[in-house]
Image (spheres, grey):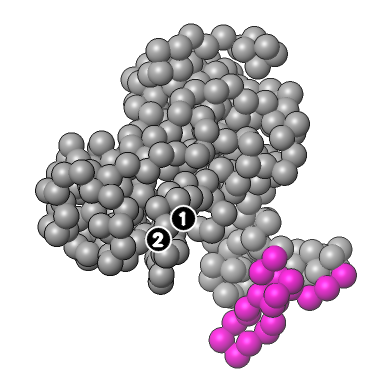
């Protein structure tokens, strides 16, 4: 795995061999053995070095994943043996980010050696990461998955929505707005069929308005914030907790218009019956404290 990664990084057998401290003939022999095992060529020989072909890029991608997982495994084993530390990989939707980051801060104040990897995405994509074992647990909605029985979930909170815009937006200081007042402005929206997008479209249809024309679609919080910062005519629907942070830090303005949420509550989700590490349980416990709830491990069995 180290050899494949080094070959991809440096495009040269000589340089790759030097990086992983083996001889060039040894690197050449190892590469031939890998290609013989897979019964296919992985690299194309070029005048200035070597480049991975399509199969090679696939193999290298998995080599990076496995090598990273092994590094995390070693880190976690050392943490367990020393009674602290370890590694966590967790997923979160946009609306849960404020609570998740606060919980991480609280956990690291008592467990500073713990390593945490965070994935922010839609609930559907986070469930896919759970299926693949790429994350330990997620703060999302298991109801959007195709196999609800494949997950264990403990409810945390509802997720109210808010409409936000640049502080210089023409309607930023206007009270008692309705959706029709925003019909001439461009929207930043979540991808199609996502609950937040569905909530907005439901309200638009209920108001008898035309469907949003030429929207900008993204599930990225940072992309949404940057677009709103750069264009004072744009508006977006985001979770209310995120909107509160943006308003409190003077980043955005929350418009005085109501978009009821159809999304239902989100919660802590794991693969059904999966064993969570002590670090994962500690982080979940901190999350529950934020919502004024008590967390015990047996909650998963209720």
Residue 68 place in picture, x, y as percent: 59, 47
Residue 217 or residue 22, whichever sits in front: 217
Q: Which residue is drawn at the image coordinates 44% and 64% (left, top)?
A: 211
Disc 1 crowd, CA 10 A, few/some/many (<14, 14-19, 20+): few
Q: Quadrant of the C terminus?
A: top right
Q: Is residue 237 above or below residue 297?
A: below
Numbered range of the magenta stretch: 39-58
Q: Quadrant of the N terminus?
A: bottom right
Is 41 left, or right, of 60 in this rendering?
Answer: right
Residue 239 or residue 73, whichever sits in front: 239
Q: Which residue is mark 2?
A: 209
Q: Which residue is mark 1?
A: 205
Q: Which residue is drawn at the image coordinates 68% and 56% (left, top)?
A: 62
Q: Disc 2 versus disc 1: distance between alpha carbons?
A: 6 Å
Is 112 left, or right, of 279 in this rendering?
Answer: left
Q: Is residue 126 above or below residue 34?
A: above
Residue 120 or residue 22, whichever sits in front: 120
Residue 84 place in picture, x, y as percent: 49, 18
Residue 41 lies in the magenta stretch: yes
Callout 1: SS: helix
Examine the rendering and report whether any part of residue 166 can be seen. Answer: yes
**Residue located farthest toward the front when viewing the structure as drawn:** 208
Residue 267 lies in the magenta stretch: no
Would you identify the image quadrant in which residue 81 lies? top right
Q: Which residue is drawn at the image coordinates 63% and 78% (left, top)?
A: 51
Residue 204 place in picture, x, y as percent: 42, 54
Q: Which residue is drawn at the image coordinates 54% and 67% (left, top)?
A: 9
Would you identify the image quadrant in which residue 136 lies? top right
Q: Are marks 2 and 1 in contact (CB under 8 Å)?
A: yes
Q: Is residue 228 above or below residue 240?
A: below
């Amino acid at each position: 795995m180290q050899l494949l990664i080094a070959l991809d990084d440096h495009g040269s057998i000589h340089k790759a061999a030097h990086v992983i401290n083996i001889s060039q003939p040894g690197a050449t022999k190892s590469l031939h053995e890998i290609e013989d095992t897979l019964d296919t060529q992985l690299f194309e020989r070029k005048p200035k070095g070597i480049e991975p072909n399509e199969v090679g890029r696939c193999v290298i991608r998995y080599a990076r994943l496995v090598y990273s997982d092994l590094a995390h495994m070693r880190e976690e084993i050392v943490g367990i043996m020393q009674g602290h530390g370890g590694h966590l990989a967790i997923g979160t939707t946009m609306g849960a980010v404020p609570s998740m980051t606060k919980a991480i801060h609280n956990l690291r104040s008592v467990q500073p050696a713990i390593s945490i990897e965070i994935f922010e995405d839609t609930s559907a994509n986070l469930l896919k990461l759970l299926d693949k074992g790429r994350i330990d647990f997620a703060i999302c909605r298991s109801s959007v998955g195709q196999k609800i029985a494949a997950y264990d979930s403990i409810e945390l909170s509802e997720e109210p929505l808010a409409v936000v815009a640049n502080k210089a937006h023409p309607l930023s200081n206007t009270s008692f707005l309705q959706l029709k007042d925003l019909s001439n402005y461009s929207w930043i929206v979540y991808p199609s069929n996502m609950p937040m997008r569905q909530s907005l479209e439901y309200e638009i249809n209920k108001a008898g308005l035309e469907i949003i024309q030429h929207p900008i679609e993204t599930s990225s919080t940072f992309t949404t914030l940057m677009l709103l910062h750069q264009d004072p005519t744009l508006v977006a629907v985001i979770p209310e907790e995120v909107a509160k942070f943006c308003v409190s830090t003077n980043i955005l303005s929350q418009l005085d218009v109501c978009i009821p949420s159809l999304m239902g509550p989100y919660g802590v989700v794991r693969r059904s019956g999966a064993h969570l590490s002590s670090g994962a349980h500690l982080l979940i416990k901190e999350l529950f404290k934020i919502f004024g709830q008590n967390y015990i491990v047996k909650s998963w069995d209720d």
